[in-house]
Amino acid sequence: MQDVGNAFTSLMPLLADLDSGLLNQMRRFNSFQGRMVTLKEEYSATCPGCGTGTNHYHSEFCDTARCAKTGIQLISCEFFSEYEYAHVCENTTWTGYWPGVLDCFEYGLFAYFVPNVGFIPCTSDHPDAVCDLNTLVVKYDWDVKLQKRVPRNA
């Protein structure tokens, strides 16, 4: 029978490769939904949440879909909107991009993550830049007519 210590040691290169791959993936992706920083790499012909195609409505329980009235995640909107204002939620279509990504590119909202510090604003050419969806949601308002976030008081 092989010694457990030796067996673990023999797995170390495999684990290191796996860990390296995960770290590289984490550097490329946002901490919440895995969004990359270039529009070319961002594009997906199908929604990662429900598989619907570009310009088609999301499925009823898709966790990627947003409420057309609030911009909030559709499956959570009824809970939150009950306390803010009454409305009937409406679904949105898959644009080919994660919700908010096009807005981040339009407004130049990017950040990189520093452990024990948090997200630091940066430009899109920073090697660890990701779309700053957090700033987008906190500092920009949902425009029902445009179906996107816009600068506050615009």
Image: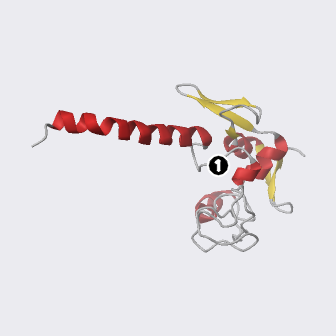
Rendered location of residue 74, percent (x, y): 64, 64
Residue 99: x and y, percent? 70, 56
> Which one is in front, 33 or 3?
3
Name the image quarter holding residue 139: top right
Task: Please tell me how many numbered marks the rendered image carries.
Answer: 1
Neighbour tally class for label 1: few under 14, some 14-19, many 20 plus, Cα within 10 Å: many
Closer-to-camera residue (31/44): 44
Q: Is residue 147 above or below residue 12?
A: below
Question: What residue is at 73 percent from the left and 69 percent from the top?
Answer: 54
Residue in the image at 68% along x and 32% along y = 127
- The three-letter code of the residue at mark 1 reads Arg
Q: Farthest residue in the right direction?
A: 154
Q: Position of residue 92 (x, y in %)?
A: 72, 68
The chosen color scheme is secondary structure
In this view, the residue in front, 77 or 54, is 54
Q: Nearer the viewer, residue 115 or 13?
A: 13
Task: Tell me the element at label 1.
Answer: loop
Q: Compared to 63, does 114 lie above or below?
A: above
- The residue singled out by tag 1 in the image is 35
Relative to 105, is 112 on the left or the right? left
Q: Which quadrant, please, contains the N terminus?
A: top left
Q: Is residue 28 left or right of residue 104?
A: left
In the displayed orientation, state which residue is furthest to the top.
117
Residue found at x 69% / y 61%: 44
Judged left or right of residue 75, residue 3 is: left
Hey, which residue is sitting farthest left in the picture? 1
Image location (x, y in percent) of residue 153:
88, 44
